[in-house]
Image (cartoon, grey):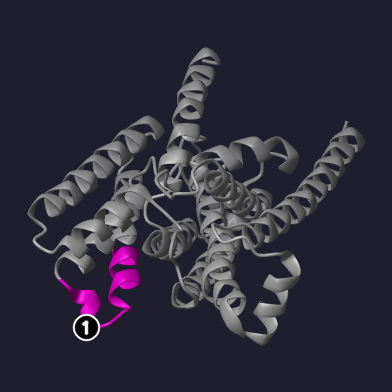
Amino acid sequence: MDDTLAAHRIRNMGDGGRATLVLACLALAFAGWSFLIGPMDLSAPALFAGLFDGHGAAGTIAREIRLPRALLALIVGAALGGSGAALQGLFCNPLAEPGVTGVTSSASLGAVIALYFGFVSFSPLALPVLAILGALAAAGILYILSQRGAGAVALILAGVAIASFATAMTALALSYAANPYAMSEIVTWMLGSLKDRTFDDVTYALPLVAAGLALLMLAGRGLDALTLGEDAARSLGVDVARTRGLVIVGVALATGAATAVAGAVSFVGLVVPHLLRPFCGYRPARLILPSAIGGAALVAAADDVLRLVAPDGQLLLGVATAMLGAPFFLWLIVKLGGER
């Protein structure tokens, strides 16, 4: 029996490693495709030449438009995928993810506050800082509820309430926005988009997302232990409070930074971990990294498809992921209900 169990675990580890490698290749391929496509017809040699020498229209487009967008697709997807896997491990609930739990909507509200009150004019850092604070507030509320014994269903319902409140406050700001530019930016953050992003956005998002994902990886052992219950985790020497704190801060950093540059992109953190969980032995620690890479591949692929289907930019990324994720979410609820 022990030999069979050991062989099963080794096979799962091998499957997880192969899946991660395949996903990494797909993410790079979709990012490369993103770099090559756009409204202006430029050949691949011209784009790569412009990327390295920076001369002419090809250099401007390659460096200032297409490369930042391709990189941000990977960064945003990694943040959402890794955060979803960590939240599902923390709450022991496959329905948890930044969008469903209200973290994404709260981060969007923080970004909207920065735009509405003009804090961005004082410092560009106001946008990511307030987005992270919004994400931290939502995750903190869920953490407090979990500490008071709220069950998995109650936490999801609380997340829905938080998301509804944040969306309502965002709509209120939109209704009273006197500045047309602020109104346009608020709408963009409500719908989610990677359009017209620059290397400044990459500079803000990358270190924060990397730090957030690093914290989530540090919490991996604790998340594995929490699948056995809090008492069992403590008996194994796991500091449960530290594990929860790492996840909450990590999710807030990663999701807040991603939302600050791309707006509300939902359901990536739900779909990707659920699809990859069978390849990772159903262990949260082994699921975080593959989910981050899978999220990067999914967002990059979705953005590529959008640019081909709607080159005018009218169909935004957050709308497309919601159209994909909402039916998946309903199917998952029906499936989990049928298993009870």
Q: Can you see residue 231?
A: no
Q: Main secondary structure of the magenta part?
A: helix
Query: Between residues 175 and 136, which one lies in front from this camera angle?
Result: 175
Judge left or right: residue 29 versus residue 59: right
Judge left or right: residue 205 versus residue 186: right
Count of marks placed on residues: 1
User: Horizontal and vertical percent for residue 201?
Assistant: 44, 72
Q: Is residue 308 above or below residue 21?
A: above
User: Horizontal and vertical percent for residue 92?
Assistant: 51, 39
Q: Residue at x 56, y 61 (%)?
A: 40
User: Horizontal and vertical percent for residue 214?
Assistant: 57, 68
Q: Residue at x 45, y 44 (%)?
A: 97
Judge left or right: residue 167 versus residue 92: left
Quarter of the image where one finds residue 148: top left
Judge left or right: residue 333 versus residue 173: right
Q: Residue type at mark 1?
A: Phe
- State the quadrant of the N terminus: top right
Does the stretch in magenta take in 302? no
Q: Residues within 10 Å of mark 1 (few under 14, many from 20)?
A: few
Quarter of the image where one finds residue 180: bottom left
Q: Can you see residue 152?
A: yes
Query: Between residues 66 and 22, which one lies in front from this camera angle?
Result: 66
Q: Secondary structure at mark 1?
A: loop
Q: Residue beneath label 1, please?
A: 122
> Range of the magenta residues?
118-133
Q: Is residue 301 above or below residue 107?
A: above
User: Horizontal and vertical percent for residue 38?
Assistant: 57, 58
